[in-house]
Amino acid sequence: MKRVVSFFLLLFSFVFLTGCTEDAKLKVTLPNGIPLISVAGTLTEDIEYNNVTGPNLLVTAFTSKEADIIIAPINLGAKLYNSGNSSYKLDSVIGFLNTYIVSIDEPLTSLADLDGKTLAAFGETNIPGITLRCALASENVNPNITYYNAINDGVAFFLKGDYQYLLTSEPVLSNLRKKVSNLKYLSIADVLYKTTELDLVPQAAVFVNSESKNTKKIAKFITAVENNITNLNRDPQGYANFIYQKDEYLESMKEDLIASSIPLSNIEFKKAIDIKEDIEKFFNLLLTEDAALVGGKLPDQAFYTPYE
């Protein structure tokens, strides 16, 4: 009888322990572009990562709950959380606003230079357009704006001289700087910092699946991301040489473009709980412009859950 009891205790222990073990690989979903550059140094064979293009695939990632970690626009994670379609919690922010006004022949010492001039822009109903209009309003500047659907759509018209100014961001900015030696640029984030209450404009954020069993791997990954961001800012060229062959998207960019885009991409690691006030200021701006962008309200305190 004792042998039978011992056997079932051993069997129960085995089932219990195997049921609680972590999955073999950490699953990370993230967008191409600067977010991928920001964490590429951490992506090893132990991580199953899925880099995607476009917001629809990120929405699917949130709702399917298959990924342990999702890197996505901060307002998208808040919107899905507020609507009850996501159980992912906000751990940290790794990217801040990196949009710029650029010009070739026109003066560009401040936004005042744009008054009455022509400007090609993008993202009219999203973050680029909203932050642009906020910055322009803060200095009472009124250019003639034409909005294009995608960031690249207005570039050729700007280079042809159809527009005096262009709104762009990295890594497109670095591409333009390679083509145009006398290109001038002005940071929208810097304007907002000086003229509004928006000291920081958070963009790319790290969201953690609250139902994931991969707790140790998640904590290890977040620490690795923080260290990685320190290293990439310290040595952009060395970092670019290290990562550019890790992914087809990065390889297509080439190491020189990756390296030149890093300094102006505003890649920083900050725990969300530490900058909650700044995040809520940004969300309040979005609520004023289009409440649907964050799900109609500020997320509750549980949304801000740092992973230790």
Image: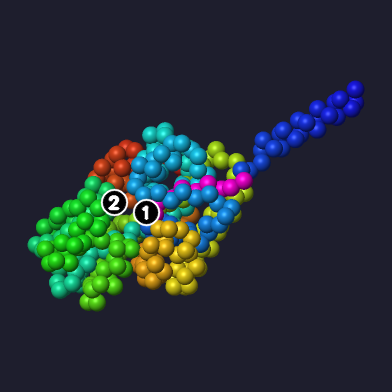
* Quadrant in the picture for residue 223: bottom right
The picture places residue 90, in percent across and down from the top left corner, at 46, 46
Question: Which residue is at the front of the view, 272 or 184?
Answer: 184
Q: Magenta segment: does it hold 194?
A: no
| Residue appearing at x 14%, y 56% in the figure | 145
At label 2, the amino acid type is Ile
Figure check: 39 above or below 297:
below
Question: Which residue is at the front of the view, 112 or 163?
Answer: 163
Camera sees residue 155: yes
| Residue appearing at x 67%, y 35% in the figure | 19
The picture places residue 251, in percent across and down from the top left corner, at 42, 63
Colour mode of the rendering? rainbow
| Residue interval drawn in magenta | 24-32
Figure check: 176 above or below 192:
below
* Quadrant in the picture for residue 105: bottom left
Q: Which residue is mark 1?
A: 203
SS category of the residue bearing label 1 = loop
Q: Are marks 1 and 2 in contact (CB under 8 Å)?
A: yes
| Residue appearing at x 28%, y 40% in the figure | 291
SS category of the residue bearing label 2 = helix
Q: CA distance from mark 1 to mark 2?
A: 9 Å
| Residue appearing at x 42%, y 61% in the figure | 250
The picture places residue 191, in percent across and down from the top left corner, at 26, 63
Question: How crowded is the residue under tag 2: few (<14 C-alpha within 10 Å), some, or many (20+)?
Answer: some
At label 1, the amino acid type is Gln
Q: Could you say which disc has been placed on residue 18 in the image?
A: none
Residue farthest along the top direction in this orientation: 1
Question: Which residue is at the front of the view, 254 or 28?
Answer: 254
Q: Decide whether the magenta segment is chiefly helix, strand or loop.
A: strand
Q: Which residue is mark 2?
A: 127
Q: Magenta segment: does it hold 29?
A: yes
Q: Earlier in the sequence, mark 1 or mark 2?
A: 2
